[in-house]
Image (cartoon, helix red, strand yellow):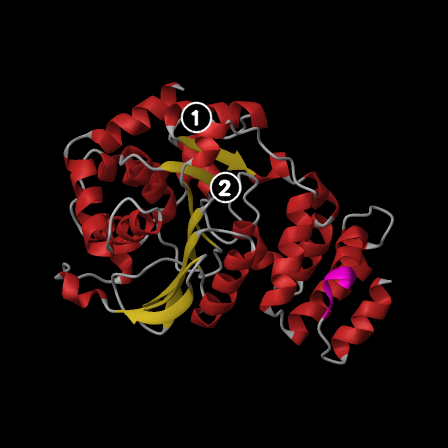
């Protein structure tokens, strides 16, 4: 069956939802060869995935995921995820993970979905573990943590057992230098089904298609961003250059715009000021920010992205208002207290 779909993709013909369901079934079947799976993923990438295909893959994989039990009161509230697709290869510290903790300290429920590092030295799971936060909670315990602490980490391998049979094909593609649809599917597969999401991508042309995908996944409010750093692009909002932003409210459609951070009167900075290291180095960077000890460009990168995340979550009415709330949350010690609470949970 995958062979037939490979021929269709080679003819630059998109896949239907029914075909994608069959493809996912084959990709998650152990008896289908790794070579065939890799050939299918390569053919799909070479054709170029359209938003309808990405949405269909995400929906199909979500139906196969393990759903954490969330109580009605938690489910009735806004649930935020903040994450990036990775792949920018710029070596920045874990900005979105820092933002997630700040937002939780500011009173937003945060369901952080993530994994260990794939394209960087330190993934969200790695740095949270280095900070002393449990990453390997059972679905029930993660649901309870979301209710009791307003923050839980949903470690991707615990919720997507089907990926076990896709991993070898992804690895083979990576060894060949071939990206696949899974390079940007990860952030779309949060099993907690967030109602609000700030998603960073490493290519500005992906902002609009992935915003359409989030909208089709019934996310109530979403923002997909990509920031410039010189000639490169960052899978976060950038304080070092202009940003492409695609955003939507479920009931209002979506819009695409650019955001220039120069109006924020930022400190002079370069990419070197935002670089991180391994998980231990990045954990120390996060501690310094949350303790209020780092007031330089790293803090400003966190405040900008936290401002956008708080805006997306409906906690504030603008990114600039969110910046001020995030800044106050750090200055008054709430962010550091939240980290300590999560460590002892």
Q: Quadrant of residue 103?
A: top left
Placement of the C terminus among the 4 image quadrants: top left
Residue farthest bottom in this picture = 11
**Tag 2 secondary structure:** strand
Q: Is residue 339 magenta?
A: no
Residue corresponding to mark 2: 113
Q: Is residue 178 visible?
A: no
**Left or right: residue 144 compared with residue 178:** left
**Left or right: residue 283 compared with residue 112:** left
Crowding at mark 2 (Cα within 10 Å: few <14, some 14-19, many 20+): many
> Residue at left 55%, top 58%?
216
Crowding at mark 1 (Cα within 10 Å: few <14, some 14-19, many 20+): some
Q: Is residue 16 above or below residue 236?
A: below
> Residue at left 45%, top 38%?
111
Label 1, label 2: how far apart the Cα atoms are: 16 Å
**Residue 89: image x %, image y %?**
44, 60
Magenta residues? Answer: 15-19
Instruction: Please tell me which residue lies in front, 317 or 228.
Output: 317
Q: Is residue 168 visible?
A: yes
**Residue 213: image x %, image y %?**
54, 60
Q: Nearer the viewer, mark 1 or mark 2?
A: 1
> Residue at left 33%, top 49%?
309
Residue corresponding to mark 1: 147
**Residue 106: image x %, image y %?**
26, 36
**Residue 256: image x %, image y %?**
38, 70
Placement of the N terminus among the 4 image quadrants: bottom right
Residue farthest front in this picture = 251
Q: Sequence-wise, which precedes: disc 1 or disc 2?
A: 2
**Tag 1 secondary structure:** helix
């Amino acid at each position: 069956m995958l062979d037939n779909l490979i021929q269709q993709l080679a003819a630059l013909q998109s896949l239907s939802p029914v075909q994608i369901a069959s493809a996912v079934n084959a990709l998650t079947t152990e008896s289908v060869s790794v070579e065939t799976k890799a050939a299918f993923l390569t053919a799909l990438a070479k054709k170029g995935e359209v938003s309808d295909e990405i949405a269909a893959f995400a929906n199909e994989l979500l139906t196969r995921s393990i759903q954490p039990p969330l109580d009605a009161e938690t489910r009735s509230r806004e649930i935020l995820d903040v994450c990036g697709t990775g792949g920018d290869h710029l070596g920045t510290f874990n900005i979105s993970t820092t933002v997630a903790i700040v937002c939780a300290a500011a009173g937003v429920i945060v369901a952080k979905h993530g994994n260990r590092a794939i394209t960087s030295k330190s993934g969200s799971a790695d740095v949270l573990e280095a900070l002393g936060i449990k990453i390997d909670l059972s679905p029930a315990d993660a649901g309870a943590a979301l209710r009791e602490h307003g923050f839980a980490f949903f470690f991707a391998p615990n919720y997507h057992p089907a990926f076990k049979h896709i991993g070898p094909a992804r690895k083979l593609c990576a060894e060949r230098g071939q990206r696949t649809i899974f390079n940007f599917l990860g952030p779309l597969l949060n099993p907690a089904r967030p109602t609000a999401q700030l998603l960073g991508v490493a290519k500005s042309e992906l902002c609009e298609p992935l915003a359409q995908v989030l909208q089709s996944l019934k996310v109530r409010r979403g923002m997909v961003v990509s920031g410039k750093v010189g000639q490169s692009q960052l899978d976060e909002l950038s304080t070092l250059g202009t940003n492409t932003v695609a955003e939507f409210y479920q009931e209002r459609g979506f819009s695409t715009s650019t955001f220039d951070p120069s109006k924020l009167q930022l400190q002079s900075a370069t990419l070197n000021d935002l670089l991180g290291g391994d998980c231990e180095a990045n954990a120390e960077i996060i501690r310094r920010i949350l303790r209020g000890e780092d007031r330089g460009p790293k803090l400003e990168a966190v405040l900008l992205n936290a401002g956008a995340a708080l805006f997306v979550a409906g906690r504030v009415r603008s990114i600039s208002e969110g910046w001020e709330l995030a800044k106050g949350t750090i200055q008054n010690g709430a962010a550091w207290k939240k980290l300590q609470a999560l460590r002892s949970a």
